[in-house]
Amino acid sequence: MSEENVAIVRDALEAFRRGEVDDAFERIHPDMVSTRVDPDGAVFHGRDGLLALMADWTEGFDEWSYRAEEFFDAGDQVVARLHQWGRGKGSGAMVDGDYWLTYLFEDGLVTRFSIFSDRDQAFASVGLSSEAARPSR
């Protein structure tokens, strides 16, 4: 089941990137909990909460995009490395960096989602050592 979870995360991230939110929501439990660990630990509830988290995350950019670059199988959890870039509103400053996303699954649906800026912290949250983790194929 865990490789299936990796495929679900990969498909959902790609659907969101294309703007196909309804397609991505097919893989997300209606009552999921989303946490923005950094910088403030904010918690969001449900699918609308996930949309609010994403809107809040990107509101400071005139341009913003991402690419999922690696996926790590952690049983009923998945870790993904997301590379994002954008241009700041007003300042025009370019921002470029990696973030770590964790997903918890129950019955084939994402029930918990978290964003981390620290790789080690993300892997520790799913019970893995970041040094020992190997990407899924």
Image (cartoon, grey):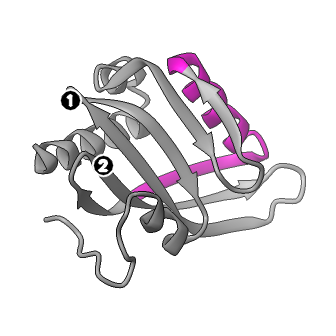
Q: Is residue 51 magenta?
A: yes
For this view, does 50 lie left or right of residue 42? Answer: left
Could you classify mark 2 by the number of other residues whose Cα lies within 10 Å: few (under 14), some (14-19), or many (20 or more)? many
Q: Is residue 40 magenta?
A: no
Looking at this view, name the residue that lies furthest to the front: 127
Q: CA distance from mark 1 to mark 2?
A: 11 Å
In front of the other: 40 or 99:
40
Name the N-terminal-most of marks 1 and 2: 2
For this view, does 63 lie left or right of residue 48? Answer: right
The image quadrant where one finds the N terminus is: top left
Q: Quadrant of residue 48?
A: top right
Q: Position of residue 56 (x, y in %)?
A: 72, 36
Report the number of numbered marks.
2
- Residue 30 vs 73, above or below: the answer is above
The residue range painted magenta reads: 46-67
Q: Position of residue 58 (x, y in %)?
A: 68, 43
Which residue bears the numbered disc 2?
77
Which label sits on residue 11? Answer: none
Looking at this view, name the residue that lies furthest to the bottom: 131
Q: Are marks 1 and 2 in contact (CB under 8 Å)?
A: no
Which residue bears the numbered disc 1?
108
For this view, does 5 lie left or right of residue 45? Answer: left
Which residue is depicted at the point 20% across and 43% down? Answer: 5
In front of the other: 58 or 74:
74
Which residue is depicted at the point 58% across and 70% down? Answer: 118
Could you classify mark 1 by the number of other residues whose Cα lies within 10 Å: few (under 14), some (14-19), or many (20 or more)? some
Q: Position of residue 101 (x, y in %)?
A: 46, 53
Query: Which amino acid type is marked by label 1?
Result: Gly
Which residue is depicted at the point 47% across and 40% down? Answer: 113
Which residue is depicted at the point 69% across and 66% down? Answer: 95
Disc 2 secondary structure class: strand
Query: Which amino acid type is marked by label 2?
Result: Gln
